[in-house]
Amino acid sequence: MREGALANIAIVGAGVIGISCAAFLQRDGHSVTIYDPLPPGEGCSFGNAGSIGPGSVVPLSTPGIVRQAVSWITDPDSPLWIDWRYLPRALPWLVKFIAAGARPRIDGIAKALRLLHADSFKHYRTLLGVDAGNLLHVSGQLYLYESDAAFAKDALGRELRASLGIRSEILGPDEIRELEPSLGPRFAKAIYLPDSGHCSNPHRLVATIAEDVARNGGRFVRASVRDFEQDAGQVRALVTDAGRIPCDMVVVAAGAWSQRLAGRLGLRIPLESLRGYHVMLPMPTPAPSRPLYPLAAKIMMTPMEHGLRIAGTAEIAGLDAPMNERRAAALGKIAKRYFPGITGEPISVWMGHRPATPDSLPVIGPSPLHGNVLLAFGHGQTGLIGGSTTGLLVSDLVASRKPTIDPYPYRANRF
């Protein structure tokens, strides 16, 4: 977009996406200023499940999702729940979500997710340097099934991963217990993904990269961006609650709040908050070595620096509804079924807004209406996985150099 020129770039959002964009842009010599009412990593990135893996290629919407979702939405403890009061507002997004689950579309979506996720660890190591060793762990992941029937039902996931060259291994009950002896004897089969792993403190990962950005001259402004001053297809300034701030270029990476900002730019992008929860539980003994994903419950159980994080659920209730304490408590109860040795109460409970598009692919690329605006949001449940590659791709697009991955699947005007 600005080949050979250095820019004063305003980045709206200090989560993992915005901070990764800032770090890679700064490496190209640009001046970056990050705007967010919260400190770096204290929004949705704070409560991330911690999973990082090239095997995360199955979109949320798949064939049969309607039948499954009907049973889920009537159960307030199910993996997916919709607040009926919010349903009229969510309906246009839900219609697109169901359409995205048609089989002809899924193969392309899975391929695009594979491209975005394949080199996550590599690009985070570039950004973290010596700090990568105590934050990133390529320890594998286990997808867990309680019966042979449940394993058979997940054939699509295995097919997609195999078609994309993702290494995996099928394990039986004895092999599962050998890898993770603290798990109870509930699981009949597992898929082991050796090239996947996790981050043991997502908040510290974002904060560490942000500190490096600040050391290299990046500025952080604790302010909310309300609007944009526009002229002839260019954004000339941000309108914030701290006043008008001129800029050369804008990257919108404000997570679930990006739709409102995109609307100010004249863009209509379907984005919904998939509200997610986590509880932190005391670490069982022995501690798990890797993220564990029981598919029946749709939760991720990840060993963190301060305990075992149980993260999951998808709740559609908008940006303003309060936390649903019942759903948070359900996560802890489910985890204790899988780990008989956990007896203590939750250490902490959290809820955050995961910005989701209907097709499970983020929006990454230039605004179709502006010459100096880039969009980087909508990663849903895979923001940590795709964050580093997104940052690199945004820097490639600003520099007008050959992009690290093909940006076409993530274009803003695909909906």
Image (cartoon, helix red, strand yellow):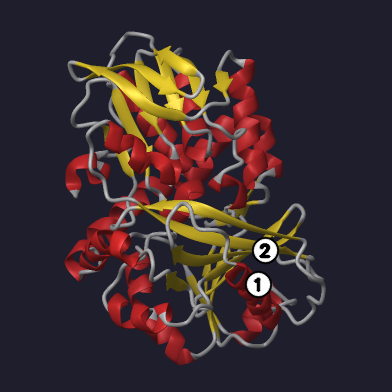
Q: Quadrant of residue 84?
A: bottom left
Q: Nearer the viewer, residue 168 or 49?
A: 49
271 relative to 208 in the view: left or right: left
> Residue 260 at what x, y percent from top left?
35, 40
- For disc 2, the marked residue is 279
Task: Tell me, yes or no, whether the two marked residues, 2 and 1, touch with CB atoms within 8 Å.
Answer: yes
The amino acid sitting under disc 1 is: Ala
> Residue 224 at what x, y percent from top left?
49, 30
Q: Nearer the viewer, residue 165 or 245?
A: 245
Give the secondary structure at mark 1: helix
Quarter of the image with the N terminus is top left
Q: Say which residue appears at 37% left-offset and 37% top-offset.
A: 376
Q: Earlier in the sequence, mark 2 or mark 1?
A: 2
Tell me the mark number nearer the camera, choosing from 2 and 1. 1
Q: Quadrant of residue 144?
A: bottom right
Residue 344 visible here:
yes
Gap in angstroms between the C-alphas marked 2 and 1: 8 Å
> Residue 160 at what x, y percent from top left?
32, 67
**Label 1 Cα crowd, 10 Å radius (few <14 / some 14-19 / many 20+):** some
> Residue 311 at what x, y percent from top left?
59, 63
Q: Is residue 238 above or below residue 111?
A: above
The amino acid sitting under disc 2 is: Val
Q: Is residue 199 above or below residue 280?
A: above
